[in-house]
Amino acid sequence: MPDWHETDAFWEDFYPVMFHDGRWEAARSEVDGILSLSGIEPGARILDVCCGPGRHSLELARRGHVVTGIDRTASYIVEARDRASQAGLDLDLRVGDVRALSETTSYDAAISIYSSIGYFDDVKERSFLAKVYGCIRDPGVFVLDTVGKEIVISGFKEQNTEEISEGLVLEENRKAAPDWSWIENRWTLTCGDVFKAGTWRTRLYSGPEISAALQDVGFASVELFGDWLGSEYDDQARRLIVIARK
């Protein structure tokens, strides 16, 4: 039986949660942060790992970067290509599993935004990070965005209900490992008579843990920030944003 992240059904069923209008609107300011914190040069060649429907790939291309986006969910890539065509943008968007990255092109930078890490066991996770490292030319930078272990512990709730948009309600039921090494979340999405449910589990990284993992595969320096404005990373941060340099 495939893991939760290997099925298109999960990503398609919960698209309204992950890619609602607010998330698309946030892409511009997030790309501002990506470029500011990383120092990526104008016209850089950028690899967007787990690009989804192209929120950041499209915005980076609008700003003149040469972008390749990869995601395993075919419908996301179809949407990203459609949006690129409508906007008159030229970028390379591919269906692919990040665990099988075999890029022959060297990139000035790679990005992985919105918690696209922690899906695999230790060996596969290290392999994934090593493949990303290998795709980046020297010098180069990897920008990673996730929710850190410190943030999860500080704000943990077993249950939460949120109205995503008018009539669309998400109920969350969470549990965590005793040592906070992972979190499991059951999502129930309702809209009128429509009901969808799915469960996902991800590994949690603390700031020191993700720093060590990235340095272990070869990155020379790792900086941590708590938001896209460059605030300090601590347990009150909004996100764990990582800038890893070769």
Image (spheres, rainbow, N blue to C red):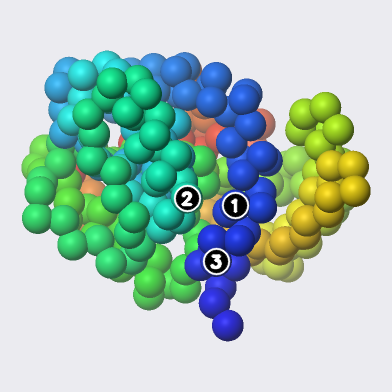
- Placement of 153 over or under 223, stated as above or below: below
**Circle number at residue 158:** none
Q: Which amino acid does label 2 sit on?
A: Ser
Residue 116: horizontal and vertical position, in percent?
Answer: 47, 50
Q: Can residue 212 be seen in this view?
A: no
- Placement of 161 over or under 21, stated as above or below: below
Residue located beneath label 2 in the image: 75
Q: Distance between the residues labelled 3 and 1?
A: 9 Å
Look at the numbered disc 1 and give the secondary structure of its residue: helix
Occupied quadrant, residue 41: top left
Front-lying residue, 129 or 212: 129
User: Dot 2: within a 10 Å radius of its alpha carbon, few (fewer than 14), some, or many (20 or more) residues?
Assistant: some
Residue 125: horizontal and vertical position, in percent?
Answer: 39, 66
Kindly identify the residue that appears in the image at 44 percent across and 39 percent down. 79
Say whether residue 223 is left or right of residue 177. Answer: left
Residue located beneath label 3 in the image: 7
Q: How far apart are marks 3 and 2 (CA)?
A: 12 Å
Look at the numbered disc 2 and give the secondary structure of its residue: helix
Circles 3 and 2, Cβ within 8 Å, touching? The answer is: no
User: Dot 1: within a 10 Å radius of its alpha carbon, few (fewer than 14), some, or many (20 or more) residues?
Assistant: some
Residue located beneath label 1 in the image: 12
Q: Distance between the residues labelled 2 and 1?
A: 8 Å
Q: Which of marks 2 and 1 is nearer the N terminus?
A: 1
Circles 2 and 1, Cβ within 8 Å, touching? The answer is: yes
